[in-house]
Image (spheres, rainbow, N blue to C red):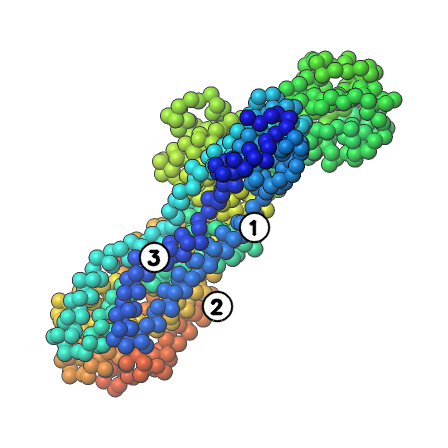
């Protein structure tokens, strides 16, 4: 066992290192690069496209492989965005990589906090972050455990009391013996509970996966049937049979839709980065658009987390002229460095005008500190109720406390002998009103969220009365409904009070998680903000987790979003981006799902009738680019902050169905009419393809309504440009031009299709939400 004064010997240190009893445990809880690549690459959607691509390559149909570029872009965008976020978080890491003083071989030396071993004797002074769990063996300090417990009050640490890793020393000096290292530390244990990566929550991507999963059930049997019919009964070559079958299967997979979603989310990530919001999981942008409950921490979220002297009220007229000199001398001689004293130091200069003879440091137990200043007397600084009787306190004290401010008083005495167990007879000298300022625009932010139907819950480890007052000053409705969760013992009791209260105080890390769980069980989509280890479990449980950059490293690593300026008032910007993405993607989604629906229906019809699928992959790819990609790319940049109320997939499929039905009706009619009139195969294919362009363009035109300059331009250029491209690349597309026989039929079919679309839209697409 280490000697309290001598510390460990070099041999004892090496022995502990050999036993892996060192503080070098890797606390990285973020997703690894390998996992990022795997999650973005190995998906069912990518697998199905890859198999089709391999089949086309094996028969030499290389001109039909362009669709693989879209798949590669999907994967690349996702990987780059996640790795970029991971690397930025690594750079943001500010957790205790500082040098720390330890006693070894009877000497004090500085080492890295990761080189600490079990039983080391560590010297801690004001301002240090505790690098491991320890027990005080000599001295006295006060610790701030706000990042661990959420409790902002200082905790007295004396002989044989425990210091938790991650806490900060606010005042005093001590030597402490290391009791836990690495993964056994308190802060690390909480962080490790959150290490299992939760799946991302994206309705858009989940919808695509549902389509891919459904398609996977039919794509293999349909593919085999179509190939066998084309090769054995249709008289086609191996290459033509594979190409025709591949076109049918590729049409069912909405690869352009996946690319649009990736680009839309990546664009949102880039725009939010300019507003100091780091998006680690780009799908969380969409999730926040659906959030209807946000759980906010108090300190550092609603407030700035930085104490500031708001006002000083001098009560002793004879000291009005030298009051600032008294305070400058007090600050110069005092070693106190807690958050309150830091605020006072920022307000008054530190200058030795009056020399201090005796100094008693501030104690959270006594709640006062004192010193004797030459030619002035004894000055005491502390809590008003500890310095003076309640009946003699000035009225300004009660008024300030009711407003939620922290108040200190100064007392003065002519006595020049003081001790820490008894106050001298004091005369009121001054009042210092201290504020943890409400963040600028916090009131407007909370008001906006309320208007948008987002409920606010304030969850803090601090005193519930203090939290309630902060909530009141921030303009939160229902601030008076607060509860102290330290009085509740069971999980059932905690979950039972979720509906009845807006403000929750003295909440443990596990209780925060319970509150989020209960809100989710009630059907809410929950976002959680936090900055400390005490928030990690709740952040991991929430649908969307938001960390402050100034907070703990573990919270930043596991959160979906990080507010780089630690300012929650940027949340509306994130909400707007999420709504813009969802609304714009939903608006154009019908264009993409038209192909999925008509490809499935035509494939079944072709399988039943032993007729070759009418289109080839390269024809489908042109529509992917010109009809789907081009207008959708520009439309997804438009602002649309409306609240999201409709489900994505049902809305998209319902809007796509009329156009898909028109494509099927036109293809069937052209095949039957052309066969009756002995048209050539290329004439029928050309007319079918031109009608496919026409019906698809109608979907683009509807998505552009109501017209503005950009939308009108997109509608016109998409329609005309696609026909021009079809004529220019007719050889590659294996089509011709309209003839004198097919042109009149084309005109008539277009007119009939317009009328039928209006009818089908009225019957099938009844809602106007995304019109």
* Above or below, 468 relative to 78: above
The alpha-carbon separation of the residues under discs 2 and 1 comes to 44 Å
Residue under the image location 56 percent in, 50 percent down: 91
Residue 423 is situated, as x and y percent measured from the top left of the image, at 73, 14
Residue drawn at (28%, 69%), measured in percent from left and top?
Answer: 54
Where is residue 314? Give x, y as percent.
Answer: 78, 25
The residue at the point 53 percent across, 49 percent down is 89
321 left or right of 74? right
Q: Which mark is residue 582?
A: none
Which of the two discs, 3 and 2, sits closer to the camera?
3
On the image, which quarter does residue 739 sit in?
bottom left
Say if 235 sits above or below 353 in the image.
below
The local secondary structure at tag 2 comes to helix
Residue 315 spot, x, y in % from top left: 78, 22
Under circle 1, the secondary element is: helix
**Sequence-first disc among 3 and 2:** 3
635 or 275: nearer the eye? Answer: 275
Q: Residues within 10 Å of mark 3 (few under 14, many from 20)?
A: few
Q: Which mark is residue 91?
A: 1
Residues at discs 3 and 2 in contact (Cβ within 8 Å):
no
């Amino acid at each position: 066992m280490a000697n309290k004064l001598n510390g460990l010997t070099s041999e004892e240190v090496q022995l502990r290192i050999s036993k892996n009893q060192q503080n070098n445990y890797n606390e990285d809880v973020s997703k690894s690069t390998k996992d990022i690549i795997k999650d973005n690459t190995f998906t069912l959607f990518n697998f199905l496209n890859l198999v089709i691509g391999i089949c086309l390559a094996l028969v030499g149909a290389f001109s039909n492989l362009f669709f693989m570029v879209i798949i590669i872009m999907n994967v690349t965008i996702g990987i780059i965005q996640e790795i970029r976020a991971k690397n930025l978080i690594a750079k943001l890491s500010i957790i205790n990589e500082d040098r720390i003083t330890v006693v070894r071989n009877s000497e004090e030396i500085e080492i890295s906090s990761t080189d600490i071993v079990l039983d080391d004797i560590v010297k801690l002074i004001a301002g240090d972050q505790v690098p491991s769990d320890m027990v005080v063996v000599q001295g006295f300090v006060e610790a701030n455990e706000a990042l661990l417990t959420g409790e902002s009050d200082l905790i007295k640490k004396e002989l044989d009391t425990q210091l938790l890793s991650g806490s900060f020393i606010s005042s005093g000096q001590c030597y402490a013996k290391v009791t836990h290292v690495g993964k056994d530390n308190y802060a690390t244990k909480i962080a490790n509970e959150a290490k299992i990566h939760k799946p991302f929550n994206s309705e858009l991507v989940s919808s695509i996966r549902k389509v891919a999963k459904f398609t996977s059930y039919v794509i293999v049997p349909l593919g085999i049937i179509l190939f066998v019919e084309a090769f054995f009964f249709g008289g086609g070559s191996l290459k033509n049979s594979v190409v025709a079958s591949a076109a049918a299967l590729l049409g069912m997979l909405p690869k352009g839709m996946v690319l649009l979603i990736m680009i839309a989310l990546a664009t949102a990530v880039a725009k939010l980065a300019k507003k100091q919001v780091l998006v680690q999981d780009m799908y969380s942008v969409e999730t926040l658009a659906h959030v209807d409950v946000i759980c906010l921490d108090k300190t550092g979220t609603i407030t700035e987390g930085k104490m500031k002297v708001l006002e000083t009220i001098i009560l002793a007229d004879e000291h009005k002229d030298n009051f600032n000199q008294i305070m400058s001398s007090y600050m110069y001689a005092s070693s106190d460095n807690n958050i309150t004293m830091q605020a006072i130091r920022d307000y008054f200069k530190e200058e030795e005008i009056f020399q201090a003879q005796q100094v008693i440091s501030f104690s959270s137990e006594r709640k006062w500190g004192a010193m004797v200043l030459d030619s002035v007397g004894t000055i005491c600084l502390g809590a008003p109720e500890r310095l003076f009787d309640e009946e003699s306190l000035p009225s300004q004290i009660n008024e300030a406390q009711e407003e939620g401010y922290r108040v200190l008083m100064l007392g003065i005495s002519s006595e020049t002998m003081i001790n820490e167990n008894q106050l001298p007879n004091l005369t009121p000298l001054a009042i210092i009103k201290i504020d943890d300022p409400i963040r600028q625009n916090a009131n407007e932010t909370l008001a906006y969220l309320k208007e948008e139907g987002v409920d606010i819950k304030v969850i803090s480890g601090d005193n519930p009365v203090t939290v309630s007052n902060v909530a009141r000053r921030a303009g939160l409705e229902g601030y008076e409904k607060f509860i102290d969760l330290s009085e509740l013992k069971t999980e059932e009791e905690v979950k039972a009070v979720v509906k009845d209260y807006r403000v929750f105080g003295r909440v443990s890390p596990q209780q925060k998680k319970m509150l989020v769980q209960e809100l989710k069980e009630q059907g809410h989509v929950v976002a959680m903000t936090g900055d400390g280890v005490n928030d990690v479990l709740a952040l991991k449980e929430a649908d969307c987790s938001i960390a402050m950059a100034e907070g703990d490293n573990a919270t930043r690593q596991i959160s979906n979003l990080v507010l780089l300026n630690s300012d929650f008032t940027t949340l509306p910007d994130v909400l707007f981006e999420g709504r813009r993405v969802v609304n714009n993607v939903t608006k154009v989604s019908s264009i993409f799902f038209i192909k999925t629906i008509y490809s499935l229906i035509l494939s079944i019809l072709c399988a039943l009738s032993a007729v070759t699928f009418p289109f080839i992959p390269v024809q489908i790819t042109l529509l992917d680019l010109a009809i789907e990609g081009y207008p959708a790319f520009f439309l997804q940049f438009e602002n649309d902050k409306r609240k999201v109320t409709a489900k994505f997939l049902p809305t998209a499929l319902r809007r796509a169905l009329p156009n898909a039905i028109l494509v099927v009706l036109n293809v069937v009619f052209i095949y039957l009419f052309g066969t009756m009139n002995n048209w050539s195969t290329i004439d029928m294919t050309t007319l079918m393809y031109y009608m496919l362009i026409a019906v698809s363009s109608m979907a683009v035109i509807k998505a552009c309504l109501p017209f503005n300059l950009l939308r009108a331009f997109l509608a016109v250029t998409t329609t005309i440009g696609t026909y021009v491209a079809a004529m220019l690349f007719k050889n590659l597309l294996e089509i011709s031009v309209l003839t004198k026989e097919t042109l009149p039929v084309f005109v008539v079919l277009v007119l009939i299709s317009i009328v039928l679309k209006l009818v089908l839209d009225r019957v099938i697409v009844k809602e106007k939400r995304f019109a």
